[in-house]
Image (spheres, helix red, strand yellow):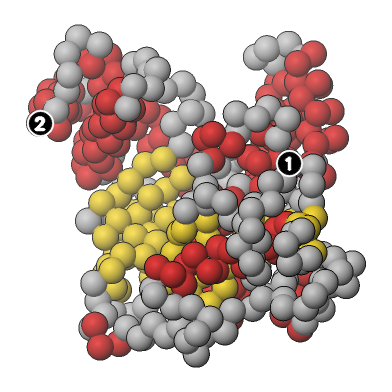
Amino acid sequence: MFTRNYKFRLYPNSNQEYRLQNNLAVCRWLYNKFVGQTQKSFLTRNDMNYILTELKQSEPWLYDYHSKMLQMVSTQFESAQKSLIELNKKRYKTGSIKFARYNEYRTFIYNQSGFKIQDGFLHLSKIGKIKIIQHREIPENAKIKQVIVTKSKSGKWFVCVTVDISESMTNIPKISFSKGVGIDVGIKNFAYDSDGNQTPNPHNLKKMLKPLKRIQRKVSRQKKGSNNRLKSILKMQKIHEKIVNRRKDFQHKLSTQYAKNNDVIFVEKLEKLNMVKNHKLAQSIMDASWGTFLQKLEYKCKLFVEVPAKNTTIDCSRCGNKVPKSLAMRIHRCDKCNLVMDRDYNASINILKKGLEIFNLSAKTSYQLPQELREVTPVEISMRSVKQEEITQLVG
C-alpha cells in the first residue's frame, strides 16, 4: 500500500466559483477564530472541535457547509502549531500564528467523504459537480482518501487528489546496478553528470526579470485599494506563475530523462540554507531550485542516494590528488596526473565513486566507472552523445 497524489485543473462556472470562494471565506473565518483563541491558551484538536460545535449552535449558517471540510480546518491549524513548535526547538526566531488575510487562505479539504470523481466531473457536497480535466487516469485499484481544492494567486482552481494504491510486494521490480550516474548540480550548468552530459541552466527568473520589474514599479506607483492596482497585481502574479510553471516543466522532463536511463542516481547532499547566505549568488541559487529537482528525482528513480559533498570538487577523479579551486576557476587541472576537464564533470565522477563505495562497488567489479583515462581531456571537445542531445533539447 502506498500513497500517490494527482493534481488536476478545475473549470467551475460563475455560480460554482462563487460557492468555492464562499467555502474559502468560511474556512478562513474559522481559522481566524482558532488564532484568536490561541492567543489566550494552546489549543488541542479536541479544544478546536469543541469550539466548532459551539460556533454551530450560535451560527446556524455553518450547517450549510460540509462538516468534514470544517473539521479539517482544525487539522490544518494543528499542523501549523506543530511546525511552529519544531522551529522553536531548533532555535529559529519565530513569532506567533498570524490571522489569515483575504486571499491568503486559498485551500480547503474534503476528507474521507463528500466527494466523487465521475465522467469528467468532480462532485463536491454542498457545491455540486465541477468540470475537471484528467490528464492522467487514476488506477482502478486506487481508493481516494481526500481531495484538496486550491485557488492559485492568478485565480485558477486546482484539485489535488490523494489516493491509496494497493500493490503486492511481488510486483515491485528488483533494483539492479547495471546503470548508475553521478549528478553535480550548479549555476552555470544546471546539471553535469558522470557520463559527460551537461544541461545548461534555463535561468527562468532571469529571462522574466525585465517584465517583472516593470510591473512591480507600476504597482508601487498606484493607489492602494484601487481597481487598477488590483489588476496590476494580478498581472504580476501571472508572471510569477509562468516562471514557476516553466521551472517545473524543465525539471520534470530532465528528472524523467535521468530516471528512465539509470537504475541508481547519486547526488551530493546540499546545505541549501548555508549556500544562500552568499548574497551575490542567492538569487541564482533560488532560481535554479535544486531542492525541488532532487525531490522529483527521488520519487521517480528506482534508487536515489545522497553522498557527502566533502571534497567532491577539489579531489582529482583520476588520481585522488587535492586541487583547491575558487568559484571563478571552472577548469580542473591536476599537476600530478595532468588531467584537464570541467570542474563540474570532475565533481560528478567523484560523486559516483563515493556512491559506489557505499555499496562496496569499485572499478574492479563488473561496474565500469565512466572516467576519462586519456592523458589530457580538452574541455572544448564536448561528448556529443545521443543522450546529451536529448537533454539539451529540453532546455531549448
Measured Cα–Cα span from mark 1 to mark 2: 56 Å
Q: How many marks?
A: 2
Q: Is residue 295 left or right of residue 217?
A: left
Residue 71 appears at what percent x and percent y?
21, 38
Above or below for 372 versus 8: below
Image quarter hosting the C terminus: bottom right
Q: Residue at x 55, y 68 (%)?
A: 352
Badge 2 density bin: few <14, some 14–19, many ≥20, Cα 10 Å: few
Task: Tell me the mark number nearer the camera, choosing from 1 and 2.
Answer: 1
Outermost right residue: 380
Amino acid type of the residue that numbered disc 1 sits on in the rendered structure: Ser
Above or below for 30 versus 364: above
Question: Can you tell which quarter of the image residue 55 is in?
Answer: top left
Q: Residue at x 66, y 41 (%)?
A: 285
Q: Residue at x 82, y 72 (%)?
A: 376
Q: Is residue 131 something that shows in the picture?
A: no
Image quarter hosting the N terminus: bottom left
Question: Can you tell which quarter of the image residue 211 is in?
Answer: top right
Res 46 label: 2
Residue 241 appears at what percent x and percent y?
65, 44
Amino acid type of the residue that numbered disc 2 sits on in the rendered structure: Asn
Above or below for 71 versus 392: above
Q: Residue at x 34, y 60 (%)?
A: 162
Q: Is residue 59 something that shows in the picture?
A: yes
Residue 78 appears at what percent x and percent y?
24, 32
Res 326 label: 1
Q: Earlier in the sequence, mark 1 or mark 2?
A: 2
Outermost front residue: 336
Is disc 1 placed on a helix, strand or loop? loop
